[in-house]
Image (tube, rainbow, N blue to C red):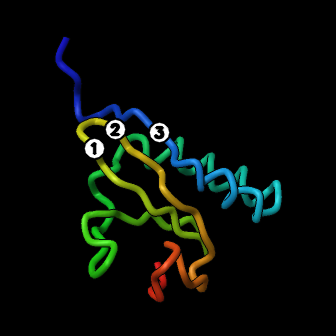
Amino acid sequence: MKESRDSWTEGVCPQLFRDLKKLSRGEARRVLDRIEAELSKNAEKYPLLRGPFAGLRKFRVGDYRVIFALLGHDVVILRIGHRRERDATPGTDTSF
C-alpha cells in the first residue's frame, strides 16, 4: 500500500516530556492539540531552521515553538519551548 503525503506518523524525543512538564496543563494541551490538528497534516510546509539546527523545522503555537524533523513520512517532535528560551540543545548558545 502506497502512503500518501496527506498523512504523517508522529514520534517524540524523550526530552519532549520534560519540555511539556514546564508548561501549564492548559498550554500543554493547546500545543498538543495544534500539533495533532495541523502539524500532522502539513508538516512539510513549515520553515526550515538554519545554523546549528539546519535540517530541522519549526512550528509556531502562540509564544511556543515546536522543533521537529521529517524522516520519510514520520514527524519526530524534538523540543517544545517558549520563543525566548535559549539553549534549545545542551552545549549550544543558540535560541530556537
Three-letter residue code for mark 1 = Leu
Label 3: how many residues lie within 10 Å, few (<14), some (14-19) or many (20+)? few
Q: How many numbered markers are drawn?
A: 3
Q: Is mark 2 on a helix, strand or loop?
A: strand
Tell me the CA gap for discs 2 and 1. 5 Å
Three-letter residue code for mark 2 = Asp
Q: Height in image: 51 above or below 79?
A: below
Residue that numbered label 1 is attached to:
71
Residue located at (36% from left, 35% from top): 8
Left or right, 66 with reference to 57: right
Label 2: how many residues lie within 10 Å, few (<14), some (14-19) or many (20+)? some
Q: Do the residues labelled 2 and 3 touch (CB within 8 Å)?
A: yes
Mark 1 or mark 3, which is nearer the start of the sequence?
3
Three-letter residue code for mark 3 = Gly
Tell me the CA gap for discs 2 and 3. 7 Å
Q: Do the residues labelled 3 and 1 touch (CB within 8 Å)?
A: no
Residue located at (32% from left, 63% from top): 56
Q: Height in image: 96 above or below 13?
A: below
Residue that numbered label 2 is attached to:
74
Q: Which residue lies furthest to the left in this view?
A: 2
Q: What element carries label 3?
A: strand
Q: Are marks 2 and 1 in contact (CB under 8 Å)?
A: yes
Q: Quadrant of residue 50?
A: bottom left
**Viewport quadrant of the N terminus:** top left
Q: Residue 32 at what x, y percent from top left?
A: 62, 48
Q: Which residue lies furthest to the right in this view?
A: 25
Residue that numbered label 3 is attached to:
11
Q: Residue 84 at what x, y percent from top left?
A: 59, 86
Residue located at (44% from left, 86% from top): 94
Left or right, 29 with reference to 34: right
